[in-house]
Amino acid sequence: MKVYTVYDEEFKPYGKVLEGYDTAELISAMNKIELPESGTAYEPSIQSLEDCSIFGELSDRAYGGMPVELGMCWGRNTKLNCLEYHKDSEVNIGAGEFILLLALMSDIKGGKLDTGKVKAFRAPAGVAVEVYETALHYAPCHVDEAEGFRVAVVLPRGTNTAMPSITAANQEDKMLWARNKWLLAHPESGEAAAGAYIGLTGENIDIK
């Protein structure tokens, strides 16, 4: 699988690099959080990260004054497993290099997405990367297994917390997996086993 970078022309439909953010303090705080023994972990809001000065900047500048949360996804991963989207952009900042597996919402056909449409993008350490609302994404992949990955995740406040109780009235409703989180799971994933909507067809990509 070809791995592009977030500076390549191919990344433009999926997102953009945000300039003018000093991420050093945030990276220091991220690196103080130990990696899980296996797999990945995710917390939508982490106080030690939100105490960093960049938190207010991201709220005011990247989200135009909207209330946001600053959490982290961290661990070790090489697989796609699922793709998700939110009704807004997501900003990612890695303490080290990481890889995003992305697809476009327009590639969803009849509630399904062929994983052959997925592309891989490498992001350098410390760079703020905006992933557009129309780009499907999920857990980052590590570049170095020994190092794993730590990726800060900025989203509107409340995203990825407990979902509302709804009665599904359309296809998209069936994909709702958490607050402001619509998920398409691969049949081989743990999320599918837990009852998530199965919306990915084809190979469960493993960049390893």
Image (cartoon, grey):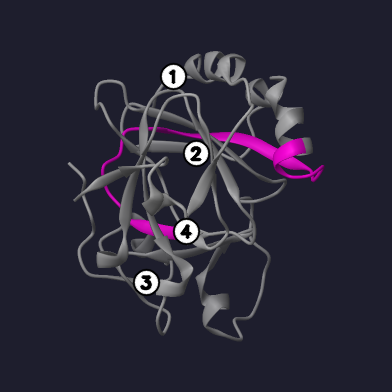
> Given the image, on which type of amino acid does mark 3 rest?
Ile
The residue beneath circle 4 is 13
Residue 85 falls inside the magenta stretch: no
State the residue at coordinates (57%, 15%).
24
Question: Marks 2 and 1, how far apart in space?
Answer: 12 Å
Where disc 3 sits, the SS reads: loop
State the residue at coordinates (46%, 73%).
106
- Circle 1 or circle 4, nearest the eye: 4
State the residue at coordinates (47%, 53%).
12
Residue 196 vertical position relative to residue 57 in the rendered view, above or below: below
The residue beneath circle 2 is 42
At label 2, counting other C-alpha atoms closer than 10 Å, the crowd grade (few under 14, some 14-19, many 20 or more) is some
Q: Position of residue 147 (x, y in %)?
A: 31, 21
The residue beneath circle 1 is 34
> Given the image, on which type of amino acid does mark 2 rest?
Tyr
Magenta residues, start to end = 61-83
Where disc 1 sits, the SS reads: loop
> Given the image, on which type of amino acid does mark 4 rest?
Pro
Which disc number belongs to residue 198? 3
Q: Which label's residue is closer to the chain start, 3 or 1?
A: 1
Q: Which label's residue is closer to the chain start, 3 or 2?
A: 2
Q: Position of residue 51 (x, y in %)?
A: 71, 20
Question: Marks 3 and 2, how far apart in space?
Answer: 21 Å
Question: Marks 2 and 4, how far apart in space?
Answer: 26 Å
Question: Marks 3 and 1, how far apart in space?
Answer: 32 Å
